[in-house]
Amino acid sequence: VSYELRTPLTTIIGYSELLERSGENLSERGRGHAAAVRTAATQLARSIDDVLDMAQIDADEMALDLEDVRVADLLGEAAARWQKEAEAAQVTIKVEHPADIGLLRGDVRRLAQTLDHLAENAVRQTPPGGVVTIAARRGLGEVQLQVTDTGRGIPFHVQAHIFDRFIGRERGGPGLGLALVKALVELHGGWVALESEPGAGATFTCHLPEAAQGAAGHPELSF
């Protein structure tokens, strides 16, 4: 199913990018349409990935590829990936962490995926002039990854179900993003918390144990 769905999407994305770069051969309006096609196809591809990942988790078939992850690099790379979209929305992205934040034992791909969903959610909910902060700090035996926005917040009646599947649509997401965040953090042996008041933004905090339990990982890095 993954192959059958992604192959035509790859073609659509490739040709839309080609049209965008066609210069004077295509009108400005036409390039805009091509960009819209590429954006929609990319979003669809990510949604398909989310569905497949959730199905893999439900089937208990997702194993973590553990390694020592440099937390500062993890945060900085996440901010860089969403910088362009943030600039288009006139939103500022900040990265905050102690200088000695060090390492976290985890699956770097899945941790990056978790931050991507939270950052995307935050940028989309933050009005022009607002700020999205991607942060990390250490607690007792854990590392906390945190994404905060200055957006419209989450209604109290939604908060209790915010990590349920498809509830995320009320925040403009694909509907599985926050459920997948919860599942990926729990795979690391952690948990996710939400703090929000309507009109006062939202903060998602991923509480991750310093040493996650999962599949055999790579040799440890040195500081």
Image (cartoon, helix red, strand yellow):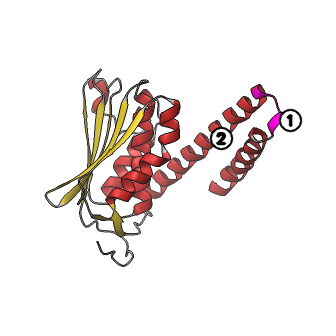
Q: Is residue 201 magenta?
A: no
Q: Residues within 10 Å of mark 2 (few under 14, many from 20)?
A: many
What kind of residue is marked 2? Ala
Q: Is residue 130 left or right of residue 137?
A: right
Quarter occupied by the N terminus? bottom right
User: Does residue 50 lie above or below 105 as drawn?
Assistant: above
Q: Is residue 202 visible?
A: yes
Whether the residues at callouts 2 and 1 have beta carbons within 8 Å, the answer is no
What kind of residue is marked 1? Asn
Q: Is residue 26 magenta?
A: yes
Residue 25's tag is 1
In the image, the segment drawn in magenta is 23-28
Q: Name the magenta segment's main secondary structure.
A: helix
User: Does residue 60 lie above or below 8 as drawn?
Assistant: below
Q: Secondary structure at mark 1?
A: helix
Residue corresponding to mark 2? 41
Q: Quadrant of residue 121?
A: top left
Residue at 63% in and 36% down: 40
- Furthest-left residue in view? 140
Q: Is residue 215 left or right of residue 205?
A: right
Q: Earlier in the sequence, mark 2 or mark 1?
A: 1
